[in-house]
Amino acid sequence: MLPEALPRPLDKPLVDHRIYTIQLRKMNEFIEVFDRLAMPILLETLGHPVGFYTSLVGAQNQFIHLWAYDSMADYEARCRARDTHPDFPKYLAASGHLITAQETRLIRMVDMPSLRRT
């Protein structure tokens, strides 16, 4: 039996798992542009992120960000708000030359019985 204080990092069943591959030696520039131009929009439209990561082992020059959603409808509504935000094109224009590839995955939570609180 697991203790009741077991932390549950995420209570939303759907996660948008994005991987941007950044041009060689341009990660710092990308992060600066992302933080300055995209983050204000993303916080307003998508809410608080699960987290941001860069690759350490395996494929290099990758910037990973995770956003959690209550449902597919929630995901679609918040993405629509992001994509139609009047300042979003400024971020796209400023970052386009830094990104060489993008992967977007929607992953869903698995209810693991052994991790349930009693």
Image: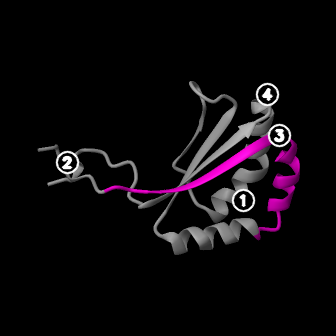
Q: Which residue is mark 4?
A: 24
Q: Which residue is mark 1?
A: 41
- 109 over 60 or under it: above or below: below
How far is the residue under mark 3 from the one under mark 4?
9 Å
**Image location (x, y in percent) of residue 24:** 79, 28
How far is the residue under mark 1 from the one under mark 2?
38 Å
How far is the residue under mark 4 from the one under mark 1?
26 Å
**Image location (x, y in percent) of residue 14:** 46, 61
| First in residue order: circle 3 vs circle 2 | 3
| First in residue order: circle 4 vs circle 2 | 4
Which mark is nearer the camera, 1 or 2?
2
The label on residue 114 is 2
**Image location (x, y in percent) of residue 77:** 61, 74
Q: Which residues are magenta?
A: 84-110
Q: Are marks 3 and 1 in contact (CB under 8 Å)?
A: no
Residue at 75% of width from left, 32% of height from top?
Answer: 27
Q: Are marks 1 and 2 in contact (CB under 8 Å)?
A: no
Query: Element at badge 2?
Result: helix
Type of amino acid under label 2: Ser
Is residue 101 rendered magenta in the image? yes
Type of amino acid under label 4: Leu
- Residue 46 lies in quadrant: bottom right
Q: Which residue is mark 3?
A: 98
Type of amino acid under label 1: Ile
Is residue 93 rendered magenta in the image? yes
